[in-house]
């Protein structure tokens, strides 16, 4: 008989979302690598089985018991390697097949929250996918599972033993610690802190191209831009002179753009972060994601530096209170409803560091921008792009940093936005970053959303010399409305 385990608050929220839309792939996540050397599917299947045995969450199902959702371990049907023969597919078709495999619905109550799929064009040309539902996993967990499968495959091939040691920590301890925090005086203080942060403010909301549907379909897309090395160097210097981190400076700049674009003076933006804060959890597979809520307040004289310093203060306070569940806050916060419903944030902003000594992790982090194949654990492995986490929210902005440059992914809900709208907003972010780096003490209210050439074209002038920046507008507000909506 399976053992019943209590869910964390994040898992309870994801179970609720799954019950609302069991076929939705909005909360699917995974990792994939191209395998460009021969491997034995039988050995790989044994490596998958050994990995599942090592991680109890991978051998778990999720169901209702006596009216409440629980985790069942072991699962009625433990995940196994599935081999899909896909001869003749070109690269585009193969990537589509991998993504389709990621997006297939999970039978959480019987088969659990994971699937392992090998899509083979030839015996020496395949893609290995580890797919999961967020109720049981996060980005680090996906990497742990893929790493263990690759390592076990190498050891089984070399000496017939998987060689995977038991995991020292467990998810039940994390759930118990969360419950103890919420029942403690510190939990009460954190609740008060987060409620004060949100009281009276609503989520930042971009104007949409279409009316918001009654329920999200979870279908999205991604638009990616790159910030070049000279701009990144200037942003780093602006952050340094402001006494804040680069993340906080970019967050303040992004909030400034939202203020100018939406005309909201007081709004909330989310930031997904990890709650994997102790060494005991380093090797544990599970959902260790929480969302921090940052409040932005702008007035006529607020500068980019002011916004960055305010953001930095909230980031530091947020990290100190990361243990309070966002899903609990959304149920209890006293704040005005928005057209998007009851959520505290519809837009998130995050930055992921890509400096990693582990070559496998490096390969995964570089998958969006491509990269060379490497030899690892007896296999030749290469990046395999896997767009995901699209359509969960209106907009999720994720910054990937390398030594000198920044890549920015704008993941958006296609039910709400056209690709051109998101592309223009991404260009505006570059413009905002350029202006904030050039003059951190400039008021955000002076951020120009259109340059002179764009305004000239909009107003029908042949030459920018024929017009002033606000020529033809009754006042600054009218200029800003045209500037934002064009």
Image (cartoon, grey):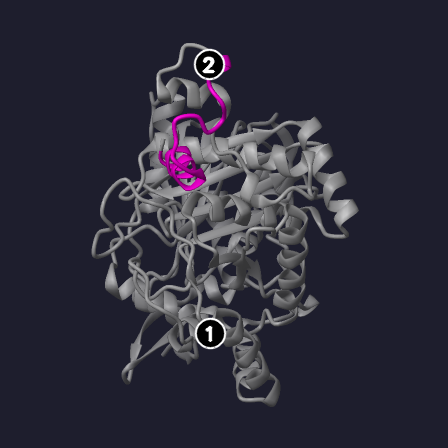
Please identify the quadrant where the N terminus is shown: bottom left
Viewer-nearest residue: 236 or 69:
236
> Residue 466 shows which numbered tag?
2
Can residue 150 be seen in the rendering of this structure?
no
Check residue 112 for magenta coloring: no
Above or below, 132 against 341 in this view is above
- Magenta-tinted stretch: 465-485
Q: Is residue 309 above or below residue 486?
A: below
Say whether residue 406 is visible. Answer: yes
The residue at which mark 1 appears reads as 8
Residue 70 lies left or right of residue 259; in this view the side is left
Q: Nearer the viewer, residue 225 or 288?
A: 225
Q: Nearer the viewer, residue 79 or 96?
A: 96
The residue at 52%/75% (across/down) is 196
Quadrant hosting residue 455: top left
Question: Which x, y percent locates residue 353?
Answer: 65, 45
Q: Which residue is at 52% across, 83% downward?
A: 179
Report, in whole angstroms, how far the alpha carbon at label 1 lies from the one at label 2.
Answer: 62 Å
């Amino acid at each position: 008989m399976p053992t019943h385990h209590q869910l964390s608050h994040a898992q309870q929220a994801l179970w609720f979302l799954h019950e609302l839309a069991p076929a939705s792939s909005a909360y699917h996540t995974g990792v994939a690598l191209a395998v460009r050397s021969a491997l034995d599917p039988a050995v790989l299947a044994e490596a998958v089985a050994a990995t599942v045995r090592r991680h109890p969450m991978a051998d778990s199902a999720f169901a209702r018991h006596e009216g409440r959702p629980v985790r069942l371990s072991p699962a009625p049907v433990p995940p196994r390697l599935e081999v899909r023969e896909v001869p003749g597919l070109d690269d585009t078709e193969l990537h589509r097949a991998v993504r389709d495999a990621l997006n297939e619905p999970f039978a959480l109550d019987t088969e659990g929250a994971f699937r392992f799929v090998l899509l083979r064009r030839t015996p020496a040309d395949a893609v290995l996918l580890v797919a999961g539902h967020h109720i049981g996993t996060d980005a680090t967990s996906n990497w742990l599972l893929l790493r263990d499968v690759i390592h076990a495959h190498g050891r089984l091939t070399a000496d017939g033993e998987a060689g995977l040691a038991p995991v020292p920590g467990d998810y039940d301890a994390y759930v118990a610690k969360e419950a103890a925090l919420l029942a403690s005086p510190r939990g009460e203080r954190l609740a008060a802190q987060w409620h004060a942060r949100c009281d009276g403010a609503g989520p930042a909301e971009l104007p949409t191209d279409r009316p918001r549907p009654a329920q999200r379909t979870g279908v999205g897309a991604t638009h990616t831009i790159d910030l070049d090395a000279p701009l990144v160097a200037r942003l780093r210097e602006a952050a340094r002179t402001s006494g804040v981190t680069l993340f906080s400076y970019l967050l303040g700049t992004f909030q400034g753009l939202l203020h100018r674009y939406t005309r909201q003076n007081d709004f909330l933006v989310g930031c997904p972060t990890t709650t994997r804060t102790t060494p005991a959890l380093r090797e544990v597979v599970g959902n260790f994601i929480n969302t921090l809520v940052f409040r932005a307040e702008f007035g006529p004289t607020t500068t980019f530096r002011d916004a960055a310093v305010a953001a930095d203060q909230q980031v530091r306070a947020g990290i100190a209170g990361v243990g309070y569940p966002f899903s609990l806050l959304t149920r209890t916060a006293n704040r005005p409803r928005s057209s998007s419903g009851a959520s505290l944030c519809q837009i998130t902003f995050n930055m992921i560091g890509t400096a990693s000594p582990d070559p496998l992790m490096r390969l995964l982090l570089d998958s969006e921008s491509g990269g060379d194949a490497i030899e690892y654990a007896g296999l030749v492995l290469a990046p395999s792009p896997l767009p995901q986490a699209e359509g969960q929210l209106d907009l999720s902005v994720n910054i990937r940093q390398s030594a000198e440059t920044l890549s920015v992914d704008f993941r958006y809900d296609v039910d709400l936005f056209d690709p051109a709208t998101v592309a223009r907003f991404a260009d505006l972010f570059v413009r905002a970053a350029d202006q904030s780096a050039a003059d951190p003490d400039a008021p955000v209210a002076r951020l120009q959303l259109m340059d002179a050439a764009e305004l000239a074209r909009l107003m029908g002038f042949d030459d920018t010399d024929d017009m002033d920046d606000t020529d033809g507008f009754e006042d600054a507000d009218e200029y800003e409305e045209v500037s934002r909506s064009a």
